[in-house]
Image (tube, coloured by chain):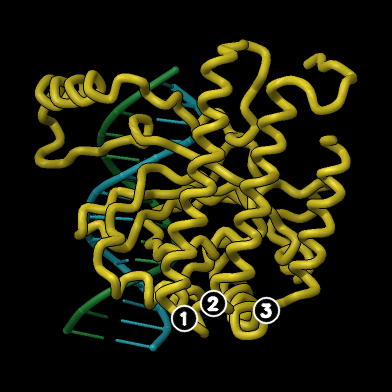
Chain colours: A yellow, B green, C cyan
DNA sequence: CCCATTTGACCTCG
DNA sequence: CGAGGTCAAATGGG
């Protein structure tokens, strides 16, 4: 991949900047939401939506930039795993029709069972240290070992599927350099680990106003780090601690790292 | 007993 | 056919 020496130019740089922005927003959200919820749960709810909107906007920018450039060389890094990301379908209506035709054409070997892939949903991804602090409540429905990855990928869907909420997400812990241990129980490593979170679809479950109120309450349940059972408990403990008494040093560390990355990019 | 998670089987797509 | 995504029975915790 050749790239111009000039800093700050080109699609990839812009995309990298936006990715950084998304990451920072996510971290900011992780910092603010628990605090805010203690003070005013309504504001916390509003903040969740605002954060979502901000991230959604920047994702749209990336999408537009990419389609405008339609360049072949720039690989969108906001989405770091190409297998996760299908192009955002421009013709949703057509896709809909396709879907229905497909439904009919399918051999009905599967009785009353239909598996949909996320391909036709809007996807946006970000890298974060706190994949569980996204303000929504998720239920895990699967976990998979991915080829060439040190850590399994976890699959989540919105808890409120009964309310026609089709939002799903996948969480993939990024590989550590060195790769000496597959499942490190080292606190530092767990804390410093980064996760690629890919969101599919939008939350349509926001209507009820009692939903977001208990989001934060359940945060410890949202721990989705792919560790063997015993270790999950450890992490849960750690997150609880994090929630009750924000781990400011760790967050500062994160922010400091972000600053470093900024310098690299610009 | 209810509900969330785990886990292996199954399905879909490239 | 392999890899990734989803389902659903089993399991365990509250």
Quarter occupied by residue A118 = top left
Front-most of residues B14 and A247: A247
A117 lies left or right of A225:
left
Of B1 and A96, nearer the camera is A96
What residue is shown at x 36% (from left), y 21% (from top)? A90
Locate the C terminus of chain A and report the quarter of the image it occupies: top right
Q: CA distance from mark 1 to mark 2?
A: 6 Å
Residue behind mark 1 = A40
Which residue is identified by label 3?
A246
- Do the residues bearing badges 1 and 2 touch, measured as CB atoms within 8 Å? yes
> What label sits on residue A36 in the rendered view?
2
Do marks 1 and 2 both belong to one polypeptide chain?
yes
10 Å crowding of disc 3: few (<14), some (14-19), many (20+) = some
Label 2: which secondary element: helix
Spot occupied by residue A44 in the image (x, y as percentages of width and height): 47, 71
Asked if residue A217 can be seen in this view, the reply is yes
- Which residue is at the front of the view, A242 or A83? A242
Q: Residue A161: percent from the left, percent from the top?
A: 25, 57
SS at badge 3: loop
**Residue A165 drawn at (x, y percent):** 27, 53
Q: Is residue A163 above or below residue A19?
A: below
Left or right, A12 with reference to A97? right
- In the image, what residue occupies the spot 58% across and 63% down? A29
Q: What residue is shown at x 47% (from left), y 49% (from top)?
A: A53
């Amino acid at each position: 991949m050749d790239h111009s020496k000039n800093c700050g130019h080109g699609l990839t740089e812009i995309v990298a900047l936006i990715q950084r922005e998304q990451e920072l927003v996510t971290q900011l959200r992780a910092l603010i939401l628990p605090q805010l919820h203690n003070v005013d749960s309504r504001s916390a709810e509003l903040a969740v939506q605002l954060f979502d909107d901000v991230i959604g906007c920047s994702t749209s920018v990336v999408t537009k930039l990419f389609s405008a450039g339609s360049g072949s060389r720039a690989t969108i890094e906001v989405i770091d795993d190409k297998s996760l990301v299908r192009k955002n379908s421009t013709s949703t209506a057509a896709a809909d029709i396709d879907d229905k035709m497909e439904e009919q054409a399918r051999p009905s070997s599967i009785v009353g069972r239909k598996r949909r892939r996320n391909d036709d949903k809007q996807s946006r991804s970000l890298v974060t240290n706190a994949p569980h602090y996204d303000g929504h409540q998720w239920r895990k429905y699967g976990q998979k070992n991915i080829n060439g990855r040190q850590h399994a990928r976890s699959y989540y869907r919105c808890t409120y599927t009964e309310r026609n909420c089709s939002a799903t997400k996948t969480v993939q812990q990024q590989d550590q350099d060195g790769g000496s241990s597959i499942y490190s129980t080292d606190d530092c490593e767990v804390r410093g680990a980064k996760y690629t979170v890919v969101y599919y679809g939008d939350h349509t479950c926001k209507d009820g106003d009692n939903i977001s109120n208990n989001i934060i309450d359940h945060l410890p349940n949202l721990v989705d780090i792919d560790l063997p059972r015993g270790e999950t408990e450890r992490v849960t403990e750690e997150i609880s601690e994090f929630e009750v008494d924000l781990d400011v040093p760790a967050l500062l560390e994160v922010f400091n790292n972000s600053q470093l990355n900024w310098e690299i990019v610009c």
